[in-house]
Image (cartoon, helix red, strand yellow):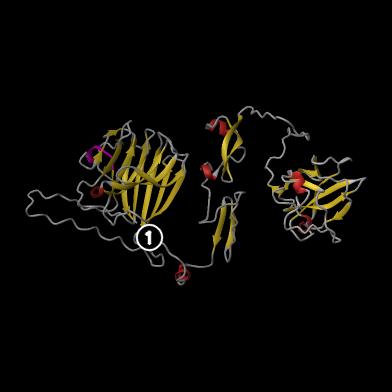
């Protein structure tokens, strides 16, 4: 034959056996060519790796083939029969015969050649003897859902199955990225996602640490240690006394500060706590000497700490005190706050900054730019109330000489997030943020930022930003931490308030640490 057909060609060669298979039975005989001229089989990857013919019988009275799978090409330990073919006589040449599976997940077929002149009975123990070509016999990873049934019904649904959501549940077809591939998937979800709908399904464990809905602040991680899939972190204590408390554990070590200070390998951050007290802050730079050629030299008032002000008519800064956009007015809404700054204010009031538009409002309280406040190892604090949906908070390390760049710690009642950001002269770049469901319009909040110089890196500072609701009996507090390397100035900035939208401030305070 000059151009033999595919099956005719296979009958004259070792097909469908792998090229590396010997074709020898357990007793050393060679399997005749032409018994099987084609085959296809699929099996789960958990069953094995290599499929092969483990038994072949051809006679005038019976024809059968057994297919098995093993995890090794040469071993016999994991041999598992997965299917067989016993066609009725006479066996038709070139016709696919379905493989009868011996376990779930197996499917395939076998095509026999011309069997009239063949009489053979042989067994094979390993894929090295009778392994099938990999493109004809391949394993697969089963899908995660193999069947669908009604609840408490053992019968499996077959054919076209229609899924329909009820009540608050909806079922939609949407693309999803699974194992790096975009696939069409069925998505089961709540049709309504407002707070009222979600509250119906929280159950007895309504508090979620990741959503900050716990009655008390939750521990989410210990450094790089994060919870497992069940939300647990295993703690192993060595050399400590552990006392279980209603909401935690008390750890006690029989060691004092003298013992700690005697160990040089213990890392210490900030100031050295092994000394009696932290180092005193450096004295502020002296004001510049008056210029004899200047008939009206600037009047500079030295800064003493704590430095700050309550907002009242006599002390409200003017537009010359570095105010851009919007306006500042006084309103009668003074909260009863334990203010640390005393002033003879006849009518204490709140500073109202911003407007309904999207203008950025920034206020700095040092009018003379030749005199700056200390910017490191300080604590900045304010009390504010959101009157609109825009973000507002503290301005840190303002640098008017460099394009009015500054850091900001702000809350956003629209996105429900606390943010530490860097204003580069054009926009605020968020450096770190945290979800904060407590942020609400019309509620007083206290915002505090502590900026500490890193003890071992002069170009690093450590931010600790705290926001808490300023209401009697409310203890909701959130902490945002960040180590920042770039762009923090060396004692050359000022502080103030910054808002985009409408907000009210009660006081601003700056103190050394």
Query: Which quadrant of the structure image shows residue 39?
Result: top right
| Residue 254 placement, left or right of 316 | right
Can residue 122 be seen here?
yes
Q: Is residue 62 left or right of residue 260?
A: right
Query: What SS does tag 1 mark?
Result: loop
Residue found farthest to the front: 2
Residue 339 visible in the current orientation: no
The magenta-colored residue range is 310-317
**Taking 285 as reference, is 416 above or below it?**
above
Residue at (76% x, 59% y) in the render: 128
Q: Residue 161 in the image: x percent, y percent?
A: 70, 30
Residue at 89 percent across and 51 percent down: it is 119
Q: Residue 267 or 490: which is nearer the viewer?
A: 490
- Which residue does the image show at 60% across and 41% down from the upper left? 205
Q: Magenta segment: does it hold 311?
A: yes
Crowdedness of circle 1 by 10 Å Cα count: few (<14), some, many (20+)? many
Residue in front for this viewpoint, 137 or 279: 137
The x, y position of residue 183, in whole percent, is 59, 39
Q: Which residue is mark 1?
A: 454
What quarter of the picture does the C terminus occupy?
bottom left
**Residue reaching furthest right?**
61
What x and y, as percent, mark residue 179? 59, 46
Is residue 254 inside the magenta stretch?
A: no
Question: In which quadrant of the rendered view does residue 505 lie?
Answer: top left
Location of residue 247 in the rendering, given as x and y in whole percent from the top left corner: 57, 50
Answer with left or right where residue 346 lies relative to residue 417: left
Task: Please determine whether, in this image, residue 79 is positioned above or below residue 507.
Answer: below
């Amino acid at each position: 034959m000059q151009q033999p057909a595919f099956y005719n060609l296979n009958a004259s060669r070792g097909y469908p056996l792998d090229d590396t298979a010997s074709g020898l039975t357990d007793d050393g005989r060679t399997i005749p060519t032409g018994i099987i001229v084609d085959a296809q089989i699929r099996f789960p990857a958990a069953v094995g790796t290599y499929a092969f013919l483990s038994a072949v019988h051809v006679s005038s009275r019976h024809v059968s083939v057994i297919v098995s799978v093993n995890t090794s090409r040469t071993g016999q330990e994991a041999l598992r029969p997965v299917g067989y073919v016993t066609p009725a006589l006479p066996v038709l040449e070139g016709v696919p015969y379905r493989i009868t599976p011996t376990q779930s997940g197996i499917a395939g077929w076998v095509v026999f050649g011309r069997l009239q002149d063949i009489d053979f009975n042989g067994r094979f123990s390993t894929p090295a003897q009778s392994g099938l070509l990999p493109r004809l016999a391949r394993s697969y990873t089963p899908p995660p859902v193999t069947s669908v049934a009604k609840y408490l019904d053992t019968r499996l649904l077959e054919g076209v199955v229609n899924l329909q959501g009820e009540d608050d549940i909806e079922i939609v077809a949407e693309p999803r990225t699974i194992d790096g591939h975009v696939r069409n998937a069925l998505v089961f979800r709540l049709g309504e996602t407002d707070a009222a709908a979600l509250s119906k399904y929280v159950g007895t464990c309504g508090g979620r640490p990741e959503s900050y809905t716990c009655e008390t602040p939750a521990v989410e991680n210990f450094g790089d240690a994060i919870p497992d899939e069940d939300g647990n972190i295993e703690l192993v204590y060595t050399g400590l006394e552990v006392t279980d408390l209603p909401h935690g554990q008390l750890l006690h070590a029989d060691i004092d500060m003298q013992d700690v200070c005697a160990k040089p390998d213990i890392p210490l951050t900030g100031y050295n706590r092994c000394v009696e007290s932290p180092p005193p802050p450096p004295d502020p730079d002296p004001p510049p000497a008056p210029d004899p050629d200047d008939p009206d030299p600037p009047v500079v008032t030295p800064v003493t700490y704590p430095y700050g002000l309550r907002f009242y008519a006599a002390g409200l800064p003017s537009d010359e005190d570095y105010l851009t956009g919007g306006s500042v007015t006084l309103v009668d809404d003074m909260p009863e706050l334990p203010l640390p700054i005393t002033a003879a204010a006849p009518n204490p009031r709140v500073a109202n900054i911003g407007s309904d538009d999207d203008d950025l409002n920034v206020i700095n309280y040092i009018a003379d730019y030749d005199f700056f406040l200390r910017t490191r190892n300080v604590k900045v604090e304010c009390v504010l109330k959101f009157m609109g949906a825009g973000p507002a908070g503290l301005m840190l390390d303002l640098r008017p000489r460099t394009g009015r760049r500054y850091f900001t710690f702000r809350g956003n009642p629209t996105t429900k997030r606390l943010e530490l950001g860097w204003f580069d002269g054009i926009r605020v770049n968020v450096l770190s943020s945290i979800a904060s469901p407590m942020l609400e319009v019309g509620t007083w909040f206290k915002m505090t930022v502590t900026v500490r110089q890193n003890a071992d890196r002069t170009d690093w500072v450590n931010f600790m930003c705290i926001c808490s609701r300023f209401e009697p009996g409310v203890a909701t507090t959130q902490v945002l931490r960040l180590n920042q390397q770039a762009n923090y100035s060396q004692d050359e900035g000022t502080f103030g308030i910054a808002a985009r939208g409408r907000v009210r401030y009660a006081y601003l305070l700056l103190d050394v640490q």
